[in-house]
Each structure stands twice: as C-alpha cells, then as structure tokens.
Image: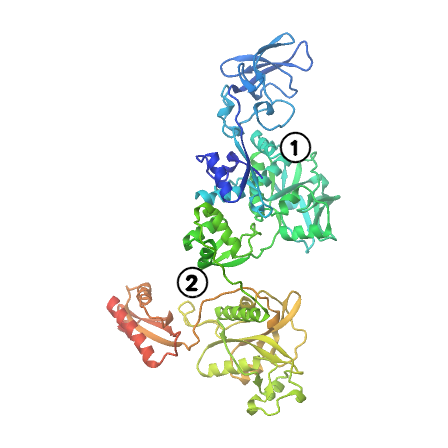
C-alpha cells in the first residue's frame, strides 16, 4: 500500500509533523513501513513558459523554442514531440545537476545554441507520464515563471510504502491510513468538499438498470458527460506514483478516487450499454456460480471480481461504486476457482463499505475537472447488521496487564470508527464498523487498544492464566433463555411461571389439541389441572384475566416453558400476551393511553425474539385465534409460530379488553447476545400525590427535587393531571403518580407511607408546597 504525505494531508492535517515521526508512528500501530522515498526536484529546475516554437532548419525531430524562465527569455532546442507554444514546463537551467553525470551546460544542437533543457517528469525525479516533456498546471500551486520547482511542496513529496497484513483491508486507502493517524495524533479528519456540476438532464432520461432481486452487492450508479474532462497534472502524478497510470483520463481518475477513499469505482461507456426505447440499459444478473455480473451489449464486469477494459472512445459514462462482503466473496472465489482481476486484490481484503461517500468524492473530483453529471442516481443497497461486542474494561486491563480507564478505551475505539455505548457495570457495548471485518471478539478489540497505546508503553507483568470457559449444549440453552427473558422484560413483558398442567375441558372448549387419552394423567391433583398442557396460552389468558379483576388496565406476560403434543412429546415454547392499554398512564398521553394494537404488539415480540416476517394464516385450528387479525411468524422461510388478536368470544369469556397473543417454537429462535439491567421480582405499588403549587413554579423544579431524594424504592413518577379554578387563585393542583418497588421485598403499607412522607417533606422544605 503506497501513501504520500501530501496526499494524506487531503484527509488529515499532518503538515507540521516530521515524516520520520509519521513512519515511526505507523510502525508502532502495526502498519509496517516497508520503504520511504523522499522526492525532491533538483535545484535549478524552474518553471518556464514556451513563448514560441519553430521547426529546426536542419533537423526534422527538433524544435527551437523561446522560453521565458523569469530572468530572461532563452533559446532551448527540444526534441520532444509534445512541446508547444503556450505551455508551462519544467526547465533545467544551465548549471543544474539532474544526476551524478548529468549537468546542464550551454550547447549547440545542429548548429543552433541551446541554453538549458525542457524536462520530462522522469528527468526531474517524478513518475513517468509519457515519452515527452511534462506540461505543468496550477494543480501543483500557482505557477510563477522562474520559480524553482523544488518550492512546490505538492510535488516534492514523501512516498511511504506500507506492508499490510491481509486482514487490514480498511487501510488499503489514503482515507483508511489517515483514520489511523488521526487517532494516534488526536487530529480530526478533514471534511471533504462536495461540489457537483450538473447538466440539465436527469439520469432517468439516459439510463435504466435492470437488476435481479438475488444480487448481494451494494451498488450506486450515476452518469456523467466527460466531453470536457481534463485531469490535472498533480492527480496524474499521484496515480503514476501508485503505478496505475494509463493514457486515459477516466481510468486515471477512477484509480485516484478508489485509492483515496477505498471505495471500488468503475465506469461503463454508454456505447457499450444495451438500448431500449432510446435508453441505455445495464443488466445486473446473478451468475450460476453466485457472482453478480453486469451486462450491456455483452458482459462488462463481474462486480468486485473482474472489470473489463473501459471503452476510451466514448464521452458519456455510467459510474459505479460497489461493495461486497470480503469473507463471503473470498470463500465463493475459492470454492468456484474462477479467474479474478486487479480489483479483487482490494475487494477480497475489504473495500470501503460506505459507497455513498466514495461516489460523492469521485463525482466532486470529476465536476471540478470539467465533467457534467446527470441529476439523480440509481441505488441498490440495504442496511447491513453490525457485530456488537460487550467489552469489559476489567477484562481488557487483565489481558493487557495495564489498567485502562473507560474514557481512554472509548476515545480510542471511537476514533477508529467503532460505535461505543456505556452498558453499565464497567462494560462497554461496542459496535464494529463494517470496514473492520477482521474484528470478531474482545481479544481483537484489546489488540486495537494495545497497538494505539503502543506496546512499548505497557510494562511487562507476570503471565496471568485463567481457565477457559467450557461451554456445552445445556449452558448454551440456559444462556439463550436468559437473554430472551431479559429482552422480553425490556419490552414491557412480565414473566410468569405456570403449571405444565391445565384443564382438558378448556382445551376442548376452544378446539385446542389434547394429549391422547391413553397417555394422559391418571390421577390429577385437582380437576382443574387434569391434563398436560398443549399450549401455554390458556394459562396466560387466565393470569391476564385475574390481573384485570385486580384493577390493572395494562397486562403483558410472557412465559418460556414445556408443552406436549397429543403423543406427549415435549417441546419448548415461548408465549406472549398483551391486553388493555399500550402504556401506563402518564403526562405524555394525558392519562389516557390508547389500547394496544396488532402491529404494536408484533413490534414488541420482534424486539424480543428477533426479526421475523408475517404471512396470513390459511388454516386456523383453534378458537383462540381471531379470524381476521392473525398471522404465521416466519423466519428464514420457515414457520416458527403464530401471532393473533384474541378471539372476541374468548375475550368475553374472560372479561378482557382487546388482547393479543403469540406462541413461538423456542428452539427455533436465534441465539444472539442481548443484555438488560437487573429488574425486581417483587410487586410494584402505585400512589398518587396531589399538590397545591404556585403557577410560577415549573414542574421541572419539582422533578429535580424528587430526583434528588435518595430512595431506591422510587422507580418512576409521572405528572398525570393538572387542575385549576377560581378557588385556587394563583395556584394549581398537580397530580403526580409514583411507582414504588423494592429489590429486596414486597413493600408494606408502612414502607410506602414512609416514602411518600419523605417526598412531601422534601418538597415542602425545598419549594414550600404541600398536598391539596
């Protein structure tokens, strides 16, 4: 991987940092510097301006040029074919030393005096662009005739070659290396310019893209008129520095943008596209080997694998930015043994997934260089799930042998592009960016911290040996159950634990499956529990009904437990029920919450067990399910359960309002890590407090006073009502609802009264207010 200091400065301000210090820093963070080349143009090479050019009278291949070098207009005989009047060129003046045995002297060529030499790029130490002289432009800086070229810092650059390991595809770009340096030096990355030049035509009037629904690539397409595109010399020299220069401006600027951003860019000539009703058409298809291919009149590319040569004879091009998961791509290439192209080196190691930013960078460049863009774009992308890792600060410190603060770890990881959230209890929840597909676990996270801190800055400590966790199927099931429990509680459900027995009469009444009589219970404990349950839902419905009889207006339960089929074969189910109000009474809903509805309930279930699809139930086998509001739960095209509104007749039987139920095969739920905070198992109590408050005292002051009270039993409080009339005058009545709950025991009336009295005393002493 080749970077240059001046190119890096487009993304990060390191202009005042010595190049040797930068190399040392790169080595310390694991980006090994293989070589450093300092390009310095020799003294005596100045900017010249060719005022005139005439053919040499005695030599067909020589030209006689009058060149202004600032101090004078001098005659130079030049053999380059591309020299012309009106050019700014590098001129080696008399006395300039270009090499060990190459000193410029006054000379006569075929009888005519020549005072100096108009140089090619290689003759002054720059990369080769052509076989002729180098024509300069102001991309290197303001051109001043006679000024020495070694004063132009953009072309007197430091070239660093980095030896990257195969898993660091995120550093296969200037932007990626700049991101690493920004963390080391604590310097913010520069915001990139966005300035596009459009013509008057929209992309829909030019292009149509037909895509299979099975493609796996992320793609963005734009189009542009490149008739007036001219790539400045600085950009050509940089592309030549990375050994990708070609005699084609569009290929050069594509290579430049790809190397700068890490986003793989390509272009297709309009002439090579298929046509339909005056539109250019690109077809994106999935090949038999599972690769995404682009077709026009013929095959134009295998995305992320191999790009065919670009047609240089056109002026209108379709621009493509693409991304593929490198692990999936590499595995498929290995399995199918297909031939790959140059682009595969970058994509197999991990190109930049933020293709939107890459396309913006590229289109900004070409707009600046004369291209005109068609308005709009075609996009084929979808949100990709990011890996989340829980990082214990204590564990990281233990692995490294050095104590790190939470702030230090968060600062390092955030700078490297990770999303970091405080999970509490000394644990950080870290989301891995898509461009770091090499990060899999806490050990990888720790390695990132160590390389930024520097291994030399960590003192040696004795080896700490810890026993490796030995997981088995039983422990995995327990872990999974606990994770799902925690997520259900997070979404407002309370866990129940009911008998595996139920009433056979109830099952039969609602046409539910029953255990075969030969396998049923012979001597039930009580008549109400005279059979094995084939569903948990009847138990939950009864529990829900009992809670409504106690005055609750919102009831939400879940249970994970065993059920039986008619042959008494056991299976694990998770069942949900939600009845009544969708939320508790609060100030935000004016104390009148709306009832739960189907999709609100479905979202809570999805937040608990993971994403799923719904499809209508074609066959309803029991009388619990509502005939019109029901659906099968589908994951990976397989039915794993159902969700439904409770049938009105059943709701009437149990005196329930609108109620929703779901039952899912627990073994078919994915085992993903989910964590929540601890919750109390003891009953919560509600108390209302009506206060007489002067109207000039805002509720925020009251809230702040209550928040300052150190009482762990106050779990929640909300303003649920305000009232004023003539009798109250300049005062008003505020009703605040408190939810009190202990983690140690069920609160008794004396405990509740003590808490409410402490609240009143605090409000009275702080604000001088009391009860109504």
**How many circles with numbers are drawn on the protein?**
2
Snapshot colouring: rainbow
Instruction: Mark 1 or mark 2: name the one nearer the start of the chain.
Output: 1
Q: Which residue is mark 2?
A: 425
Mark closer to the observer (1, 2): 2
Q: Is residue 345 above or below residue 728?
A: above
Q: Categorize mark 1 by other alpha carbons within 10 Å: few (<14), some (14-19), many (20+).
A: some
In the image, 267 versus 384, the foreground residue is: 384
Q: Which residue is mark 1?
A: 246
**Picture coordinates of residue 44, whole percent (x, y):** 51, 19
Q: Residue at x 57, y 51 (%)?
A: 438
Q: Is residue 118 above or below residue 668?
A: above
Could you say whether the residue bearing mark 1 is in a helix, strand or loop? loop
**Picture coordinates of residue 65, whole percent (x, y):** 60, 14
Q: Give the quadrant of residue 628.
A: bottom right
Instruction: Answer left or right for 126 relative to 409.
Output: right
The Cα atoms of the two marked residues, 1 and 2, are separated by 57 Å
**Picture coordinates of residue 39, whole percent (x, y):** 54, 28
Q: Farthest residue to the top: give it.
A: 111
Is any part of residue 644 visible from this angle?
no
């Amino acid at each position: 991987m080749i970077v240059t200091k001046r190119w890096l400065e487009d993304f990060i301000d390191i202009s005042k940092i010595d190049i040797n210090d930068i190399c040392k820093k790169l080595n310390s963070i694991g980006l090994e510097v293989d070589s450093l080349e300092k390009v310095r143009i020799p003294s005596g090479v100045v900017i010249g301006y060719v005022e005139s050019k005439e053919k040499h009278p005695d030599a067909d291949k020589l030209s006689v040029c009058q060149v202004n070098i600032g101090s004078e207009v001098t005659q130079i005989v030049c053999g380059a074919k591309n020299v012309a009047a009106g050019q700014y060129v590098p001129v080696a003046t008399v006395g300039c030393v270009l090499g060990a045995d190459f000193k410029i002297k006054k000379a006569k060529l075929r009888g005519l005096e020549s005072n100096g030499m108009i140089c090619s790029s290689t003759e002054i130490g720059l990369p080769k662009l052509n076989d002729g002289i180098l024509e300069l432009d102001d991309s290197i800086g303001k051109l001043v005739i006679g000024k020495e070229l070694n004063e132009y810092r953009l072309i007197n650059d430091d070239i660093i070659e980095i030896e990257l390991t195969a898993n660091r595809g995120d550093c296969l770009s200037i932007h990626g290396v700049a991101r690493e340096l920004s963390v080391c030096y604590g310097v913010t990355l520069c915001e990139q310019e966005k300035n596009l030049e459009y013509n008057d035509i929209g992309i829909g009037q030019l292009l149509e893209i037909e895509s299979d629904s099975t493609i796996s690539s992320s793609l963005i397409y734009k189009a542009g008129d490149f008739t007036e595109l001219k790539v400045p010399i600085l950009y050509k020299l940089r592309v030549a520095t990375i050994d990708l220069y070609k005699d084609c401006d569009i290929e050069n600027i594509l290579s430049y943008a790809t190397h700068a951003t890490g986003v793989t860019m390509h272009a297709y000539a309009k002439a090579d596209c298929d046509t339909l009703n005056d539109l250019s058409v690109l077809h994106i298809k999935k090949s038999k080997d599972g690769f995404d291919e682009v077709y026009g009149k013929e095959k134009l590319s295998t995305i992320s694998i191999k790009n065919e040569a670009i047609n240089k004879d056109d002026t209108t091009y379709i621009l493509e930015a693409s991304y593929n998961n490198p692990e999936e791509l590499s595995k498929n290439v290995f399995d199918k043994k297909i031939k790959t192209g140059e682009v595969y080196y970058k994509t197999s190691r991990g190109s930049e997934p933020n293709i939107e930013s890459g396309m913006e960078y590229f289109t900004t460049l070409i707009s600046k260089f004369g291209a005109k863009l068609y308005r709009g774009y075609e996009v084929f992308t979808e949100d990709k799930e990011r890996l989340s890792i829980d990082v214990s600060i204590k564990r990281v410190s233990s692995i490294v042998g050095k104590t790190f603060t939470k702030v230090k770890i968060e600062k390092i990881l955030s700078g490297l592009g990770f999303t970091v959230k405080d999970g509490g209890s000394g644990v950080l929840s870290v989301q891995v960016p898509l461009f770091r597909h090499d990060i899999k676990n806490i050990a990888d996270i720790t390695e990132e911290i160590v390389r930024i801190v520097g291994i030399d800055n960590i003192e040696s400590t004795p080896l700490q040996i810890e026993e490796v966790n030995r997981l088995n199927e039983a422990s995995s099931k327990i872990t999974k159950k606990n994770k799902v429990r925690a997520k259900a509680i997070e979404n407002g459900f309370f866990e129940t634990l009911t008998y595996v027995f139920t009433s056979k009469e109830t099952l039969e009444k609602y046409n539910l499956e029953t255990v075969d009589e030969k396998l049923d219970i012979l001597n039930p404990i009580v008549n109400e529990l005279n059979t094995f349950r084939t569903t948990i839902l009847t138990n939950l419905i009864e529990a829900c009904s009992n809670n409504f009889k106690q005055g609750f207006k919102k009831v939400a339960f879940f249970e994970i437990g065993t059920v039986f089929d008619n042959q008494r074969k056991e299976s694990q189910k998770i069942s949900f029920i939600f009845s009544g109000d969708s939320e508790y009474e609060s100030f935000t809903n004016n104390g009148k919450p709306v009832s739960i509805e189907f999709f609100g309930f479905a979202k809570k279930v999805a937040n608990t067990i993971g994403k799923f699809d719904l499809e209508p139930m074609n066959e309803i086998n029991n009388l619990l399910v509502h005939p019109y509001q029901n659906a099968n739960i589908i994951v990976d095209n397989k039915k794993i359960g159902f969700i439904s509104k409770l049938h009105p007749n059943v709701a009437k039987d149990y005196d329930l309002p609108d109620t929703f139920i779901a039952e899912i095969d627990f073994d078919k739920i994915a085992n993903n890590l989910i964590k929540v905070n601890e919750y109390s198992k003891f009953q919560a109590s509600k108390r209302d407090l009506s206060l007489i408050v002067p109207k000039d005292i805002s509720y925020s002051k009251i809230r702040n006073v209550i928040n300052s009270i150190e009482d762990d039993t106050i779990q929640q409080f909300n303003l649920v009502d305000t009232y004023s009339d003539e009798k109250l005058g300049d005062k008003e009545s505020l009703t605040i609802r408190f939810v009190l709950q202990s983690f140690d025991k069920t609160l008794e009336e004396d405990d509740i009264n003590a808490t409410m009295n402490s609240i009143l005393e605090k409000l009275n002493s702080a604000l001088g207010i009391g009860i109504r």
